[in-house]
Image: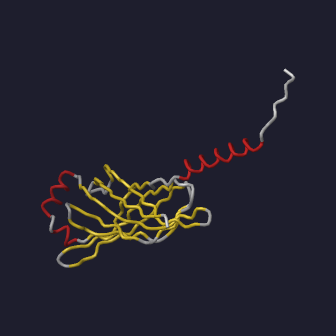
Amino acid sequence: MGKKVKLNWTSALVGAASATAAAAIILGKPRDPTFQLVSINFTSFKLNLPVIDTDLILTVHVSNPNIVPVHYSSAEMSIFYGGTRLGCAMIEAGSQPPRSCRLLRLQARLGGLQLAHQAARFLADLRRREMVLDAAVDIEGSAKVMWWDHKFRVHVDSHVVVDPVLLDVIDQDTKSEMEVFVV
């Protein structure tokens, strides 16, 4: 019982450094951000004879699950209906703190002429009160880790079912895929 144990400080330091490095690798692995459409609000109608263009505000919930802040450039999200590009929404350049959530309000314009080409389908969707929209966007930016900026690109595909009368979001499936560039 009286035996003394000699501690090897070199082994202890190497073990602590290895555990810290393993934790940094596990926690520091880039994760895809998440996007969820919260609401759609009409802001105005623009008479563009013979059709009417519609301006909307899309409220999108964005989550950054990473341990570093991200800075991103402006981008244009394309909105599709029945395979036809119906309009777009602008994403302004900005940043998001680490492990945070934010609501983005995106201004969107939907073209009445493009919707007029899908009139039969749109009227059927109005009767069913279900309209399927798809959206796609590529967002580029950088994340600063220590002294280095790491460039990234996030591709987001959304499949959203909305009620065209009340503009309620009925269902959605959003997939994002991040690509990190190591220079």
Q: Picture quarter containing residue 86?
A: bottom left
- Number of numbered labels in the structure image: 0
Q: Picture quarter containing residue 178?
A: bottom left
Residue at the image point whose x is 36% and y is 59% from the top: 156
- Considering every residue shown, the one lying at the far bottom of the view is 49
Q: Picture quarter containing residue 35?
A: bottom left
Please provide percent x and percent y for residue 161.
28, 53
Residue at the image point whose x is 33% and y is 53% from the top: 169
Please provide percent x and percent y for residue 113.
19, 72
- Color encoding of the figure: secondary structure
Q: Between 48 and 142, which is closer to the camera in this rendering?
A: 142
- Residue 7 appears left or right of 48: right
- Residue 9 appears left or right of 26: right
Q: Between 52 and 109, which is closer to the camera in this rendering?
A: 109
Residue at the image point whose x is 60% and y is 46% from the top: 23
- Considering every residue shown, the one lying at the far left of the view is 120
Q: Is residue 109 above or below residue 13?
A: below
Q: Is residue 10 above or below residue 85?
A: above
- Considering every residue shown, the one lying at the far right of the view is 2
Q: Between 175 and 91, which is closer to the camera in this rendering?
A: 175
- The quadrant in which the N terminus is found is top right
Please provide percent x and percent y for residue 101.
51, 56
Please provide percent x and percent y for residue 28.
55, 53
Q: Is residue 39 above or below residue 87?
A: above
Residue at the image point whose x is 36% and y is 70% from the top: 76
